[in-house]
Amino acid sequence: MGVVEDTEPPLKRAKRLVGEPNGFSGNSSVRPCSVNNSLGDLMARPLTSQGDDQTIGSKGVIKKSEFVRIITRALYSLGYDKTGAMLEEESGISLHNSIIKAFLQQVKDGKWDESVKTLHRIGLSDEKAVKSASFLLLEQKFLELLKFEKILDALGTLRNEMVPLRINTKRVHELASSLISPSSLVSHTSSAPGKESVNSRSKILEELQNLLPASVIIPEKRLECLVENSLHIQRDSCVFHNTLDSDLSLYTDHQCGKHQIPSQTVQILASHTDEVWFLQFSHNGKYLASSSRDQTAIIWEINADGKISLKHTLVGHQKPVIAILWSPDDRQVLTCGAEEVIRRWDVDSGDCVQMYEKGGISPISCGWYPDGQGIIAGMTDRSICMWDLDGREIECWKGQRTQKVSDIAMTDDGKWLVSVCKDSVISLFDREATVERLIEEEDMITSFSLSNDNKYLLVNLLNQEIRLWNIEGDPKIVSSYKGHRRSRFIIRSCFGGYKQAFIASGSEDSQVYIWHRSTGKLIIELPGHAGAVNCVSWSPTNLHMLASASDDGTIRIWGLERINQQNQKKQVQGSSSNGVIHRCNGN
């Protein structure tokens, strides 16, 4: 049922051609904690207390003293001061030794001279870390003296204490300039110096944590950082991960199964009377739009219970509708008739509000300006045209294109115009600098899709391969996906799932294919359609909702396996839907 005779409109299919292992992603979200990474960490004098050489845990790699100190630090950070003090007393393991305690208190009290002396008593071997910390303390001393108009004392601190450190010369010059114009540094301070000083000193303590080894000042959020990294590692190593972070738990190790991937048909939409060529969820996830060979487009509404109902049937095109695209605010849609016209529709009313055409040539692809105030289109004469919303032509140019622009898109910042310019070449045109970068593929390009962050481009090829390109800077291939079938028709794929971690695609063998984006591993094949699957779209707001459009004239909505089978039978939407049919007369 997926085979179409040669009389099929040429845009429905591509031209005929004559004649990785599972693992972690290189883009893992686990990052080093924003804590001390100073080289002095290895050279700092260790805190002395009981249990330094004891370990806990089944693998014997956790030092008891460090473990207890980190828990103590977390208790104090959470405001459980009494409990923290009790843990120190009962365990005999102090959070900080007496010298560190004295140093931290001196900083809190603003005793800068004493704090600098105590800093040198800590016994750090990293001279650079000591100098940087000293500079930080003396800078705060300088600023407080300047604030209280003790200009000579501030000058003495700068000249006799900070300059000899011979670091951060640029900052020294800035401070020296402030002696001439103190307001340039301290005009922002409040009239309540006590409160302002406390806030400034708290910031100094935070900066000291980044300068001094963790064995000297245990980072405030160290326990949270360790736990978060553990959760992120579990999440990133989960091949089927497709849940929100709020679903992660500390009680058990995280591991998703295939049941988190939408793989069960939960609804069948059958209001189109011919092949469905394109579909797309709205940005807010409240609607689904589809277009068909039957010369209509449909706007579907997603109800609160997840069921989908027909909202409007858009009638007016005289040829098959090859695409339907949502405006950035989801209040309008564009429909593109096959070598006919582009129509703009109001979503609420279903009315056609504008047509876009150019004499002698017709559109074969279209898209929105990122601000929703303009329309772009690829034309049959291989040119690209732009209109404002009222239909006034803004620009039209052809360039070096050797084929019709079968796909076109603009990045969210409006800077880059992406289009197919030759059989196997995609153009990335910088509209600001008026320069062009090219992506050269190994075979004919049939379609492409931009990721939500506009950093990646998913390219479908004639040779039954989908390739992922990173288009930041010089374009480079990141991954590829194989397994689906494509020989005659244009098959579209999409990003989807948690942080767009999956790639889904239609296929001429009537199935939907889903791969893990990072590894390229084929995760699942979804049977059900009775004809070629032309297009897929993954809901941007519901991780567990996927839609597919087929030559069998239906749209399948895929959800999780736990959906009750009996309920699914009741959710089939036929042509008897009570949606309203809207006809467009082109006015």
Image: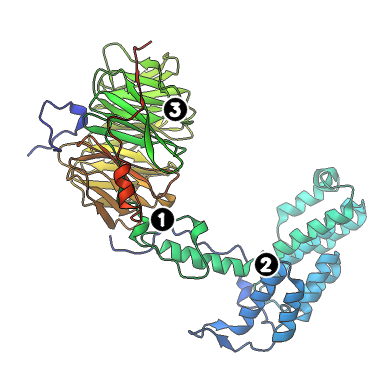
Quadrant placement of the N terminus:
top left
Secondary structure beneath label 2: loop
Secondary structure beneath label 1: loop
Q: Residue 112 versus residue 551: which sits nearer the camera? A: 551
Q: Where does residue 274 sit, x and y in percent of width and height?
A: 21, 30
- The nearer-to-camera label among 2 and 1 is 1
Question: Amino acid under label 3?
Answer: Tyr
Q: Residue 488, which numbered label?
A: none
Q: Quadrant of residue 489?
A: top left
Which residue is identified by label 3? 369
Disc 3 crowd, CA 10 A, few/some/many (<14, 14-19, 20+) = many
Question: Amino acid under label 2?
Answer: Glu
**Whole-Å distance between the Cαs marked 1 and 3?**
31 Å
Disc 2 crowd, CA 10 A, few/some/many (<14, 14-19, 20+) = some
Query: Which badge, 3 or 2, is on the more N-terminal residue?
Result: 2
User: Looking at the image, which residue is at 31% across and 40% down?
Assistant: 439
Query: Which badge, 2 or 1, is on the more N-terminal residue?
Result: 2
- Which residue, as the protein is rendered here, is positioned at the far left? 19
Q: Where does residue 421 sit, x and y in percent of width and height?
A: 28, 31
User: Looking at the image, which residue is at 37% across and 46% down?
Assistant: 545
